[in-house]
Image (spheres, helix red, strand yellow):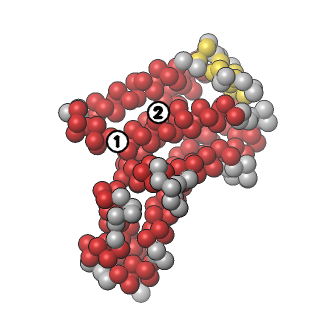
């Protein structure tokens, strides 16, 4: 029985991987369930056993992407933001984050850059799904607003959310409308575009993947450092 369970999970994963390749290379609308089934080596009925529709496969891919990204964000918030607050090394105010010393501020910036590089690596690893997400967000279909689900990471104030985790440590924490606009259009969108166009850029410009990633990180570092003023990070 355990073997059959493993076999079932393996089949489902193969369906997901093949469908991901089809959606990324051909586009979601042009992909056909019968061709996905053929490439997996199963009949179409088995795909519908695991997923109600082609849309359900895409829903699964997007939901898994956002859940995994959320885990990375939450780990950084807990390990560094909350920990520094609890240790008295960080005091959050509405328009700035105040550190106990310039050394603490520098430590935080360094950890932020390490965290962002982890996020970039995550985006590149999952760039086929991100490419699908970006493409579908430009269409007027069911998944038109899927990209905006990223904002749920910021808007959700329920227990265990990113917002509540930091707020529980410092009640002065909060988002302004400008903060959210910045995080979406200068944080998530450049990251997702970088991942979505990564392969095309490498091919068209003849640049090594490692060089392209390094250049992206250099400019992110310049932008992030621009918010640091002594021992404070200015938000507005």
Quarter the N terminus occupies? bottom left
Q: CA distance from mark 2 to mark 1?
A: 23 Å
Residue 107 lies, in percent from the top left, at 55, 24
Which residue is at the far front?
140
Eyeballing the image, is 159 above or below 96?
Answer: below
**Which badge, 2 or 1, comes first in the chain's sequence?**
2
Q: Is residue 206 above or below residue 15?
A: above
Q: Tell me the quarter of the image containing the C terminus.
A: top right
Relative to 12, say whether 43 is above or below: below
Q: Which corner quadrant of the image does residue 50 belong to?
A: bottom left
Q: Which residue is mark 2?
A: 114
Residue sitting at 32 percent across and 40 percent down? 198
Q: Which residue is mark 1?
A: 197
In the image, residue 220 above or below residue 169: above
Q: How busy is the neighbourhood of tag 2: few (under 14 within 10 Å), some, or many (20 plus)?
A: few
Residue 99 spot, x, y in % from top left: 67, 21
Left or right: 1 in relation to 180: left
Outermost residue on the top side: it is 230
Mark 1: secondary structure? helix
Most extreme residue toward the right is 171
Please state which of residues 81 and 16 is positioned toward the viewer in this rendering: 16
Residue 101 percent across, percent down from the top left: 65, 16
Under circle 2, the secondary element is helix
Decide if residue 100 is on the left or right side of residue 117. right
* Mark 2 touches mark 1? (CB < 8 Å): no
**Going 34% across and 41% down the picture, which residue do you hit?**
197
Quarter of the view holding residue 218: top left
């Amino acid at each position: 029985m355990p073997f059959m369970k493993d076999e079932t999970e393996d089949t489902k994963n193969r369906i997901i991987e093949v469908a991901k390749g089809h959606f990324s290379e051909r586009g979601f609308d042009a992909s056909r369930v019968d061709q996905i089934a053929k490439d997996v080596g199963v009949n179409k009925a088995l795909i519908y056993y695991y997923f109600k529709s082609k849309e359900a496969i895409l829903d699964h891919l997007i939901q898994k992407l956002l859940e995994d990204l959320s885990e990375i964000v939450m780990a950084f918030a807990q390990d560094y933001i909350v920990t520094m607050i609890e240790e008295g090394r960080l005091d959050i105010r509405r328009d700035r984050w105040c550190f106990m010393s310039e050394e603490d501020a520098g430590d935080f910036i360094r950890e932020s850059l390490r965290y962002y590089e982890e996020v970039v690596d995550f985006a590149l690893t999952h760039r086929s799904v991100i490419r699908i997400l970006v493409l579908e967000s430009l269409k007027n279909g069911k998944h038109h607003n899927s990209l905006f689900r990223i904002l749920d990471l910021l808007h959700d104030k329920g227990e265990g959310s990113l917002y509540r985790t930091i707020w529980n440590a410092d009640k002065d924490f909060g988002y302004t409308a400008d903060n959210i606009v910045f995080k979406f259009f200068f944080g998530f969108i450049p990251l997702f575009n970088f991942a979505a166009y990564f392969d095309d850029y490498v091919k068209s410009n003849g640049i090594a993947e490692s060089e392209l990633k390094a250049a992206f990180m250099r400019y992110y570092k310049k932008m992030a450092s621009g918010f640091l003023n002594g021992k404070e990070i200015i938000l507005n």
